[in-house]
Amino acid sequence: MKVTIDGQSIDVEPGTTILQAARMIGGDLVPPAMCYYSKLKGSGGKCRCCLVEVSKGSEADPRPMPKLMASCVTGCMDGMEVNSKSSDRVTEARKSVTEFLLINHPLDCPVCDQAGECDLQNLSFEHGNPKSRFIEEKRTFEPEDIGPNIQLHMNRCILCQRCVQVADQLTDNRVHGVLDRGDHANISTCISKAIDNEFSGNMIDVCPVGALTDKTFRFKSRVWFNKPYNAHRECTTPGCCGKTTVWMFGGEIQRVTGRKDEYHEVEEFICNSCRFDHKNVNDWVIEGPREFEKDSVINQNNYTQKLEKVEIATEKNILLGRDEDRKKISMAEIPLNTNNQNS
């Protein structure tokens, strides 16, 4: 089937969604997504960030769809034409959705461990309003320990339900979910039961905001101060790939995460043993520095970017004599005279 998005056409297989087709094309036309996760079955359709305008339904029925459609759950049709970044309706809708998501979200980016790799920060940077129109009191929750290594900050949660789907699809006994309804809805465990399954740490990786944080990394360092390296180990836990990204500060491993692609989705899930228990460099086979597929605060001015040599053009002989001047004023060239001490 042939689908056209913002004037760019691509052939896709039946069953492909508009968001998947946009990601095949790549570039700025890819809609943002806060709840869709390609590795999780049934994800999408909750945050409404990926709204697009379908100006032509298909060759068989060329009528446009009257409403904006969620691209993550809308299937492609042959001859379909879609407006994403080029549509003013879509831009205004995404601004409204972003404003809605930020209604109860606290402004705690300076202390949040997710800062620098937060999807909501990226969404707000592109579609957010610098001024808030919300005058009511924000709803607040106390931080909650939902496991030995995971802390839940419900104030930051946008109810994307990724963590619930991870627990459903990776474990046999999910003990947390969405409690209450309407504006009282929140993520919590049933009767304060701790989440202790072997793959619970993947909830941290799939969370698009700072609602679920790693207690072993909490307040240790900013992500842009760490250098990410691909690493692997022979893991004996069934279902764990053993392929990770280790985040190092000097010679110390600060944290371990799954390997993520340019859309911040993990390639394969890892177990808690790899994530929390192996923070020694000798536990891993370091493959090399991890490259980022798009610009990020994490990879600004670091070793993965090609830096051009800077040459200062000056007049001939203008810098002559500098070396001699340095010797004259250098502390090392002037021995300390202990006999002449000022009283």
Image (spheres, helix red, strand yellow):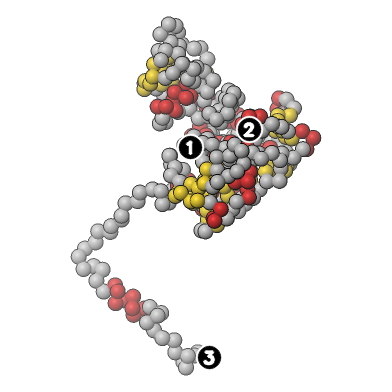
Which mark, by number, is residue 214?
none
Q: CA distance from mark 3 to mark 1?
A: 67 Å
Residue drawn at (53%, 28%) of the image: 38
The secondary structure type at the circle numbered 3 is loop
N-terminal label among 3 and 1? 1
N-terminal label among 3 and 2? 2
Which is in the foreground here, disc 3 or disc 2? 2
N-terminal label among 2 and 1? 2
- Residue 160 rendering spot, x and y as whole percentages: 62, 30
Q: Is residue 10 left or right of residue 238?
A: left
Q: Could you tell me the amino acid type at mark 3?
A: Ser
Residue drawn at (62%, 41%) of the image: 237
Please say if 249 is above or below 128.
below
Q: CA distance from mark 2 to mark 1?
A: 20 Å
Please tell me which residue lies in front, 305 or 335.
305
Number of callouts in the render? 3
Residue drawn at (79%, 35%) of the image: 191
Q: Could you tell me the amino acid type at mark 2?
A: Leu
Q: CA distance from mark 3 to mark 2?
A: 76 Å
Which is in the foreground here, disc 3 or disc 1? 1
Crowding around mark 3 (Cα neighbors within 10 Å: few <14, some 14 to 19, many 20+) is few
Q: Is residue 89 left or right of residue 148?
A: left
Which mark, by number, is residue 261?
1
Which mark, by number, is residue 170?
2
Crowding around mark 1 (Cα neighbors within 10 Å: few <14, some 14 to 19, many 20+) is few
Q: Is residue 90 left or right of residue 280?
A: left
Please say if 187 is above or below 236.
above
- Residue 285 rendering spot, x and y as whole percentages: 50, 51
Q: Which residue is mark 3?
A: 343
